[in-house]
Image (spheres, rainbow, N blue to C red):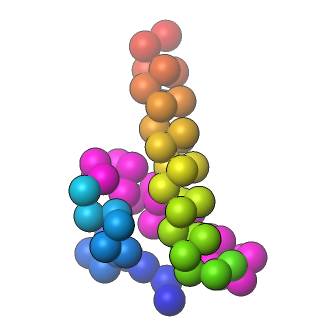
Amino acid sequence: MPWSNGDYPPSYKNLPKPIREKAVEIANALLIDKHMDEGAAIAIGVKNAKEWYRKQQKDDRK
């Protein structure tokens, strides 16, 4: 089931908004494009969104 920023997995509830939005985007892509299991898509979405955010912060400091 694809999610939106108003309707996302409960485990995303406490994530900062930019990370949550990116995690939703990644998880949806995994569900739709890769037909991945929801649990795996949620976990990978969070992991990759956190990495994306750290990279954004590092790039902004340059």
What residue is drawn where x is 56% and y is 80%?
Answer: 38
Q: Main secondary structure of the magenta part?
A: helix
The answer to whether residue 41 is above or below residue 17 is below
Q: Position of residue 47 (x, y in %)?
A: 54, 50
Decide whether residue 24 is among the magenta residues. Answer: yes
In the current view of this chain or complex, which residue is farthest to the right?
34
What residue is drawn where x is 48% and y is 31%?
Answer: 54
- Relative side of 58 to 10, left or right: right
The answer to whether residue 22 is above or below residue 35 is above
Looking at the image, which is closer to me, 56 or 39?
39
Q: Position of residue 55 (x, y in %)?
A: 53, 30
The answer to whether residue 57 is above or below residue 16 is above
Is residue 5 in view?
A: yes
Q: Position of residue 21 (x, y in %)?
A: 39, 59
What residue is drawn where x is 43% and y is 13%?
Answer: 61
Which quadrant of the structure image shows residue 20? Answer: bottom left
In the current view of this chain or complex, which residue is farthest to the bottom?
1
In this picture, which residue range is highlighted in magenta? Answer: 15-35
Looking at the image, which is closer to me, 18 or 43?
43
Is residue 25 in view?
A: no
Which quadrant of the structure image shows residue 37? Answer: bottom right
- Relative side of 35 to 17, left or right: right
What residue is drawn where x is 59% and y is 70%?
Answer: 41
- Relative side of 38 to 15, left or right: right
